[in-house]
C-alpha cells in the first residue's frame, strides 16, 4: 500500500526541504520507490536540494489543466527509484487552492505507483498546508529547538485539530457552527479541552459526531526535532507532546531527533543530499535510521475525506476562519515577541493555548504540570 507522508512546520526554515530530499533518498536506498512532491506553492526549492534545474513543468500545470495527469510531471532525480514532482511558479504561494483542486491533486498523488509519496509543504498554518497535512494520519511536523519554532508548531497542531473536526461535518451544519464558535471563544485555561468539546459534540450529535471525534483521535502527527544539539533540545519536543495531548487531545508521536550538522550547508552548496555526499555524517545517519523505522511501520488508512467541503468563496471564508484565528494568534505572538526583544514572558496569553506551553518552558522541564 502506498504511503503518503506530508512534511510540514509551523515556522519556516527549519529543514523541511532538506529532510524531504534526504529521507526520500534514504527510503529509496531501502528498495522503496519514492516520489518527492514540492508542494511549497510559490516558494519551491526542493529541486535545488537534489541538484535538478527548474525547467520542468510542475504542479501548477495540473491545477491549470495544461497537464492532465500527475505522472506526466515526474522528473528523474538521477537516483534509482527516486522521483520528483517539482513545484512551479504558476502557483503563487498566497493563492488558496480550491478544495476541488486539492482533492484532485490528492487523488492523483494517491494513485502514483510508489511505496512512499513525500510532500514538502510550505511553512505555516494556511489551510492549503493544513489540508494536505491532514491527508495522512501521521504527517511529519518539523521543528528546531527554538521557542518560536515550538510555539508555531503548537499553533499549527491547533489549527490542524480544529480543521479536522470542522471538516468532518457537512457544510452549513450546526456542528460546524459550533466548532467555529468554540474556536472563537477563549477556552484555554477554562478547563474544557478541545477534546472534551469534541466529545460533548459527539454525544449531542449521535449521527455525525462520533465519526468526527474518531477522526480527531486517529490524528497522530510525528514530531521531528531537527538541528538538535543537546538532550534538553529533545525535551522541547516532549513538552510539545504533553501540552498538545492535554489541550488538544492530540497523541503526538516521536518521529526523529536529527542533529545540527555543518555538512547540511555543504550539501546544499554542492546540490547533493548529505546522505549521498557524506552518509557517515550525523544528520545523514539520523535520517537513515528514521527511514528504517518508517519502512517498518505499517501503512494506516487515511482520514475520511470531507467530500462535500465548500468550494465557493464565501464557504471557503467560513472554513478559513479557524485558520485565520490561529494566524492572528501567531501574529499577535510574533509582534509581542519582537517588541520585547527576546523574552517569551510578554506573550503567553497572546497565543492561543500558549499559556501552558510557556509555563512549561518557565518551569524548566518539570513540564506540562500534569
Ligand atoms: N540538521 C541541520 N544542520 C544544520 N543546518 C541545517 C540542518 N537542517 C537544516 N539546516 C539549514 O537550514 C536551512 C533551511 O533548510 P530548509 O530549506 O530545508 O528549510 P525549510 O523548512 O524547507 O524552509 P522553508 O520553510 O523556507 O521551505 C538550510 O539552508 C540548511 O542549511
Ligand atoms: Mg522548504
Image: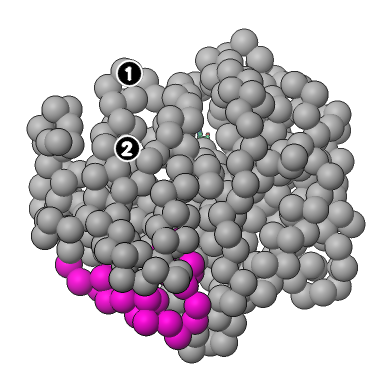
Q: Kindly tell me whether residue 217 is visible in this rendering.
A: yes
Q: At 12% across and 56% down in the image, what residue appears? A: 191
Q: Which residues are magenta?
A: 164-186
- Image point 39% across, 76% down: which residue? 176
Label 1 belongs to which residue?
A: 230
Residue named by callout 2: 241
* Residue extending furthest toward the front: 206
Give coordinates of residue 17: x percent, y percent: 59, 41
Nearest to the observer: residue 178 or residue 14: 178
Mark 1 in CB contact with mark 2 (< 8 angstroms): no
Q: Which of the two labelled residues, at mark 1 and mark 2, occupies the earlier sequence position?
A: 1
Q: In the picture, which quadrant includes the N terminus?
A: top right
In front of the other: 270 or 276: 276
Q: Position of residue 251 (x, y in %)?
A: 38, 41
Q: Dot 2 surroundings within 10 Å: few (below 14), some, or many (20 or more)?
A: many
Q: Which one is in front in this view, the residue at disc 1 or the one at disc 2?
A: 2
On screen, residue 325 above or below 340: below
Q: Which is more toward the observer, 367 or 53?
A: 367
Check the image and report above or below for 23 versus 14.
above
- Find residue 28 and report its horizontal and vertical position in percent: 76, 28
- Camera sees residue 121: no
When the figure is inspected, residue 20 is found, relative to residue 326, above or below; the finding is above
**Was residue 175 drawn as part of the magenta stretch in this picture?**
yes
Look at the image and tell me in which quarter the C terminus lies: top left
Residue that extends furthest to the top in the rendered view of this protein: 280
Residue 346 placed where, x, y %? Answer: 10, 53
The answer to which image quadrant residue 40 occupies is bottom right
> Residue 122's quadrant in the figure?
bottom right
Amino acid at each position: 500500500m502506498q504511503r503518503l507522508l506530508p512534511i510540514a512546520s509551523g515556522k519556516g526554515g527549519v529543514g523541511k526541504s532538506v529532510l524531504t530530499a534526504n529521507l526520500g533518498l534514504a527510503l529509496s536506498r531501502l528498495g522503496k520507490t519514492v516520489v518527492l512532491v514540492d508542494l511549497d506553492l510559490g516558494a519551491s526549492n526542493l529541486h535545488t536540494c537534489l541538484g535538478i534545474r527548474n525547467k520542468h513543468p510542475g504542479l501548477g500545470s495540473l491545477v491549470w489543466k495544461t497537464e492532465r495527469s500527475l505522472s506526466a510531471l515526474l522528473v528523474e532525480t538521477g537516483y534509482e527509484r527516486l522521483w520528483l514532482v517539482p513545484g512551479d511558479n504558476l502557483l503563487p504561494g498566497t493563492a488558496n487552492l480550491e478544495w476541488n483542486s486539492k482533492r484532485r491533486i490528492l487523488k492523483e498523488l494517491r494513485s502514483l505507483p510508489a511505496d512512499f509519496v513525500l510532500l514538502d509543504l510550505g511553512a505555516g498554518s494556511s489551510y492549503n498546508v493544513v489540508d494536505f497535512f491532514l491527508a495522512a494520519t501521521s504527517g511529519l511536523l518539523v521543528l528546531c529547538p527554538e521557542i518560536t519554532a515550538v510555539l508555531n508548531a503548537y499553533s499549527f497542531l491547533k489549527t490542524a485539530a480544529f480543521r479536522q473536526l470542522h471538516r468532518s461535518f457537512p457544510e452549513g451544519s450546526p456542528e460546524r457552527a459550533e466548532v467555529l464558535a468554540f474556536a472563537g471563544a477563549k477556552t484555554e485555561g477554562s478547563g474544557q479541552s478541545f477534546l472534551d468539546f469534541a466529545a460533548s459534540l459527539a454525544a449531542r450529535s449521535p449521527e455525525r459526531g462520533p465519526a468526527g471525534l474518531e477522526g480527531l483521535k486517529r490524528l497522530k502527527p510525528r514530531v521531528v526535532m531537527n538541528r538538535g544539539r543537546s538532550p534538553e533540545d529533545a525535551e522541547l519536543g516532549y513538552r510539545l507532546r504533553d501540552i498538545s495531548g492535554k489541550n488538544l487531545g492530540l497523541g503526538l508521536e516521536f518521529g526523529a531527533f536529527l542533529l545540527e550538522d555543518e555538512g547540511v550547508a555543504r550539501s546544499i552548496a554542492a546540490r547533493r543530499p548529505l546522505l549521498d555526499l557524506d552518509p557517515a555524517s550525523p544528520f545523514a545517519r539520523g535520517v537513515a535510521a528514521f527511514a528504517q523505522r518508517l519502512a517498518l511501520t505499517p501503512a494506516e488508512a487515511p482520514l475520511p475525506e470531507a467530500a462535500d467541503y465548500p468550494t465557493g468563496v464565501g464557504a471557503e471564508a467560513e472554513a478559513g476562519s479557524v485558520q485565520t484565528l490561529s494566524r492572528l494568534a501567531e501574529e499577535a505572538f510574533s509582534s509581542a515577541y519582537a517588541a520585547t526583544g527576546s523574552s517569551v514572558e510578554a506573550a503567553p496569553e497572546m497565543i492561543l493555548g500558549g499559556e501552558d506551553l510557556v509555563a512549561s518552558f518557565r518551569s524548566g522541564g518539570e513540564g506540562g504540570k500534569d
